[in-house]
């Protein structure tokens, strides 16, 4: 009823003419928006071109919803879709790195005539077409509603990513809160596993005093194998990480906890390649526990009312379509965890590092939020795999940190994480369609966050 009321009260001046390009004839008699034509690409005369796969069906308000986005300045628009009323594909908002890895935009894509001509529109049923249009669009808009129905929609296919050979020194910032054994394990694993050798080690020592640990530090410093910063305040890990970073010389910074070990030999090179791309603020790897369960595939803001990852502590075999998309696909995400976080030194310094008011929890996620405020992407890269200690689980923040994080992430808690479709359930650790779309803040309230 609300949608019918909105349509009856909305007047477009002027209403854009939508040319529908589809290989099969469509039944459009019940469309509430009437300023359209069905034409082939050569005869289309519309202000916008809506490309649809053969055998498509549109909801009766679909053209109205597309026209509304156009009148609000969008020159490239896509929507959610399903398969004969089943198997819905609920998509994230526009995510350029995700789209490179997987054509999640799928079936229905509307582009303005100007964009189509400017981008040299060709091969309009291909992944490359979606990439070309979105890359040159002034505003890409996502309608988070199922407006397209197909008899059989194309499955999500992940495109293999072949990183280039990026060079530059990586400063590995190791934050040691766990002591001698954990640090030794990390140092040995980096030396034995990493195929990238242009790196330096900077250790932020926030661990309880151990005689053997101190001897290890002295040996590392004497042999110039590592720089050691002995933390003045081990309770403030954000400050410790900032001070350790000030001693680093690398072009790139990679943050790891003592006890975390690389599983993939090219983890440094893969993360560096992504972090080096124009428009990228930070890249982070896939985090697993030693038994193969997942620790993190990027953070969903508002999941269970906090900053958590999908499929956490789960074996992810067998993979369904959504599971593969979230765990195996290079994706734009709203935040990453500290372990495996790589960022250019120049970008880190330009943001004055981590927020030291968030002493132990959430400072990496808050840093990612500031990157996005500067229009810099935050990207999950599953090809870089690291194994974390089983004790490295999301920590519940104290009241002060919780209030601070609530202030930072409140807009996403109200309106939803843009990388997580609002039709999905914020109270489920695996991707599941919500019985009723509800925001994380509505679910958990001001006082229920992280409880």
Image (tube, grey):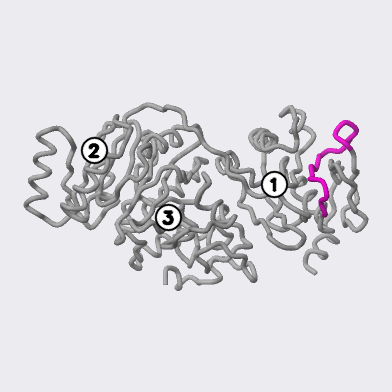
195 to 352, vertically: above or below: above
Which of label 2 and label 3 is nearer to you? 3
State how far apart marks 2 and 3 are (Cα).
24 Å
Q: Where does label 3 land, which residue?
A: 296
Q: Report x, y in % for residue 98.
A: 56, 44
Q: Main secondary structure of the magenta part?
A: loop
Q: Are marks 1 and 2 in contact (CB under 8 Å)?
A: no
Q: Quarter of the image holding residue 347? A: top left
90 to 5, vertically: above or below: above
Direction front: furthest residue: 318
Q: Is residue 54 magenta?
A: yes
Q: Left or right: 99 with respect to 394?
A: right
Mark 1 vs mark 3: which is more N-terminal?
1
Q: Left or right: 146 with respect to 432?
A: right
Pick the quarter of the image with the C terminus: bottom left
Q: Left or right: 145 with respect to 199?
A: right
Q: Where does label 2 land, which residue?
A: 201
The residue lying at 46 percent from left, 44 percent from top is: 381
Q: Report x, y in % for residue 392.
A: 31, 59
Categorize mark 1 by other alpha carbons within 10 Å: few (<14), some (14-19), many (20+).
many
Query: From which residue to which does the magenta span run?
Result: 40-57
Q: Report x, y in % for residue 288.
A: 38, 54
Q: Quarter of the image holding residue 76? A: top right
Direction right: furthest residue: 29
Q: Secondary structure at mark 1?
A: loop
Categorize mark 3 by other alpha carbons within 10 Å: few (<14), some (14-19), many (20+).
many
Q: Where does label 1 land, which residue?
A: 106
């Amino acid at each position: 009823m609300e949608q019918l009321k909105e349509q009856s009260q909305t007047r477009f001046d002027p209403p854009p003419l939508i040319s529908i390009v589809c290989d099969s004839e469509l039944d459009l008699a019940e469309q509430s928006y009437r300023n359209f034509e069905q034409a082939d690409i050569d005869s289309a005369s519309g202000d916008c071109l809506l490309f649809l796969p053969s055998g498509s069906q549109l909801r009766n308000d679909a053209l109205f919803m597309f026209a509304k986005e156009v009148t609000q300045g969008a020159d490239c628009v896509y929507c959610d879709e399903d398969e004969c009323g089943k198997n819905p594909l609920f998509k994230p908002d526009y995510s350029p790195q995700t789209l490179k890895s997987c054509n999640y935009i799928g079936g229905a894509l509307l582009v303005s005539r100007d964009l189509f001509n400017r981008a040299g529109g060709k091969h309009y049923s291909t992944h490359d077409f979606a990439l070309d249009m979105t890359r040159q669009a002034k505003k890409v808009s996502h309608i988070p509603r199922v407006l397209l129905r197909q008899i059989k929609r194309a499955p999500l296919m992940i495109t293999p990513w072949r990183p280039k050979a990026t060079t530059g020194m990586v400063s590995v910032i190791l934050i040691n809160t766990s002591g001698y054994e954990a640090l030794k394990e990390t140092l040995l694993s980096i030396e034995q596993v990493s195929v990238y050798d242009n790196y330096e080690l900077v250790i932020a020592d926030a661990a309880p005093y151990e005689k053997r640990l101190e001897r290890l530090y002295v040996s590392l410093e004497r042999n110039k194998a590592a720089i050691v910063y002995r933390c003045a305040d081990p309770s403030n890990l954000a400050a410790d990480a900032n001070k350790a970073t000030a001693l680093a010389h690398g072009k790139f910074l990679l943050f790891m906890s003592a006890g975390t070990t690389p599983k993939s030999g090219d983890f440094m090179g893969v993360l560096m390649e992504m972090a080096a791309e124009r428009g990228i603020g930070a890249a982070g790897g896939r985090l697993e526990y030693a038994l193969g369960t997942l620790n993190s595939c990027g953070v969903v803001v508002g999941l269970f009312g906090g900053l958590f990852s999908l499929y956490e502590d789960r074996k992810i075999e067998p993979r369904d379509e959504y599971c593969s998309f979230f765990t195996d696909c290079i994706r734009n995400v709203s935040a990453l965890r500290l372990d495996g976080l790589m960022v250019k030194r120049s970008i880190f310094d330009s943001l004055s590092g981590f927020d030291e008011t968030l002493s132990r929890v959430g400072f990496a996620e808050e840093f990612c939020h500031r990157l996005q405020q500067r229009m810099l992407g935050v990207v999950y890269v599953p090809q870089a795999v690291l194994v974390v200690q089983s004790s490295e689980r999301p920590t519940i923040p104290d009241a002060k940190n919780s209030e601070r994080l609530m202030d930072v992430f409140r807009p996403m808690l109200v309106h939803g994480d843009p990388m997580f479709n609002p039709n999905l359930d914020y109270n489920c650790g695996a991707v599941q369609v919500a019985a009723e779309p509800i925001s994380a803040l509505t679910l958990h309230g001001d006082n229920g966050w992280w409880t």
